[in-house]
Image (cartoon, rainbow, N blue to C red):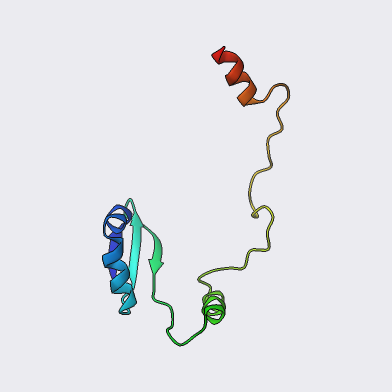
């Protein structure tokens, strides 16, 4: 399994996707920290089966909508909006 930086992946995406198609797995890093793995999907399964297979293996999760858990509460501001203040300042 090859490890490659995100910049190198972006520059040579087609080449790496061809390698993934042949069955190779690629680990993607950002500033030397592993952030993702690119793996080929099973060729036999239909589209929905592929998605359920990824969910079963814990690669992806179902999103029920709404705000993600652990996000800080929205800060409520009083007075003018920031965009109004910027527009006023530009005049």
Nearer to the camera, 18 or 29:
18
Q: Position of residue 62 (x, y in %)?
A: 62, 68
Outermost residue toward the front in this view: 91
The spot of residue 38 in percent (x, y) is 38, 68
Residue furthest to the top in view is: 91
85 relative to 30 in the view: left or right: right
x, y percent for residue 6: 33, 55
At x 50%, y 71%, the residue is 59
Coordinates of residue 71 in the picture (x, y in percent) = 63, 48
In this rendering, position of residue 33 left or right of residue 47: left
Q: Quadrant of the rendered structure where residue 88 is?
A: top right
Where, quadrant-wise, is the C terminus in this rendering?
top right
> Vertically, is 27 above or below 50?
above
Task: Decide: is 90 above or below 26.
Answer: above
Q: In the figure, is residue 29 to the left or right of 85?
A: left
- Of residues 51 and 90, which is closer to you in this image? 90
Q: Residue at x 52, y 75 (%)?
A: 54
Q: Residue furthest bottom?
A: 44
Corner quadrant of residue 32? bottom left
* Residue sitting at x 59%, y 19%: 87
- Quadrant (top left, top right, bottom left, bottom right) of the N terminus: bottom left
């Amino acid at each position: 399994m090859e490890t490659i930086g995100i910049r190198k992946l972006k520059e040579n995406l087609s080449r790496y996707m061809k390698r993934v198609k042949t069955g190779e797995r690629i680990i993607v890093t950002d500033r030397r920290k592993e952030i993702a793995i690119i793996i080929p999907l099973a060729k036999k399964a239909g589209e929905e089966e592929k998605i359920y297979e990824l969910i079963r293996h814990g690669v992806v999760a179902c999103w029920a909508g709404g705000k993600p858990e652990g996000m800080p509460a929205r800060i409520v501001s009083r007075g003018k909006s920031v965009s109004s203040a910027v527009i006023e300042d530009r005049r």
